[in-house]
Image: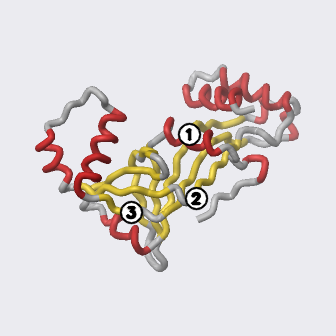
Amino acid sequence: MSLYTPGHFEGRDRAAALRLIAAHPFATLVTTVAGDEPQITHLPLLQQGDALHGHMARANPHWQAFAHGRTVAIFHGPHAYVSPRWYETPAQHVPTWNYAVVHVAGRPQLVEGMAALDSLRALSAHFDPDFDADPQRVERLAAAIVAFRLPLERLDAKFKMNQNRTAADRAGVIAALAAQPAAADRAVAEWMRTHE
């Protein structure tokens, strides 16, 4: 699965891509098997070392396709509409969308036993460190999930943030987005400021 990425939008900074994953861990997991409809699941994934870790309901047939197809996890970072009115010469431009996205491709590996429980606990501790679940209850509930790790075999990042525009146009977009009421718009302005 490939990500269309013109050269000026290619995210070559692996550390920035991993920071995006950490900041936006809710992913779209897609597995394709030749001749079948793609399996798609939305779930949080945490990077630990050289892999992403997560789990899904055992009743979800998606995990059964892992061994037979190709899998990619898609992480969406900040994104926002960009008006041509924000450029120096608006009539010469069209509306567009600025965004940051990371794709991680690999072959998921099922994780069982204590490793699955550790993965489940790590996810819970990451999002709710003060939650103290009863260990016996967690073990019972773990039977209803399938834990897995997705090795970081390939990581593609696309940071489409007006890099193909003049400094003046970029400054106009940053100022306009920073003044918008939506937090998502301001997040794009901040990304543009910090990733010049």
Image spot of residue 51 (x, y percent): 46, 52
Q: Look at 66% across and 20% down and name the residue there.
A: 179
Q: Tag 3's secondary structure?
A: strand
Q: Residue at x 36, y 35 (%)?
A: 126
Q: Residue at position x 40%, y 67% from top?
A: 66
Task: Determine contact: label 3, label 2, CB under 8 Å.
Answer: no
Seen from this angle, which residue lies furthest bottom?
35
How many marks can you see? 3
Which mark sits nearer the N-terminus, 3 or 2?
3
Tell me the element at label 2: strand
Query: Which amino acid type is shown beneath numbered disc 2?
Result: Arg
Residue bearing mark 1: 20
Q: Position of residue 133 (x, y in %)?
A: 18, 35
Question: Residue 154's mark?
Answer: 2
Which amino acid does the dot numbered 3 rest on? Gln
Residue 109: mark: 3
Tell me the CA gap for discs 3 and 2.
Answer: 15 Å
Disc nearer the start of the sequence (1/3) = 1
Q: Nearer the viewer, mark 2 or mark 1?
A: 2
Rendering quarter of residue 192: top right
Left or right: 168 as drawn, with respect to 154: right
Which color scheme did the rendering employ for the protein?
Answer: secondary structure
Separation of residues labelled 1 and 3 (CA atoms)? 23 Å
In the image, what residue occupies the spot 58% across and 22% down?
Answer: 181
Residue 168 % position (x, y): 85, 28
Which quarter of the rendered picture does the N terminus lie within? bottom right
Q: Nearer the viewer, mark 1 or mark 3?
A: 3
Question: Which amino acid, mark 1?
Answer: Leu
Mark 1 residue crowding within 10 angstroms, few (<14) / some (14–19) / many (20+)? some
Q: Which mark is residue 88?
A: none
State how far apart marks 2 and 1 are (Cα): 15 Å
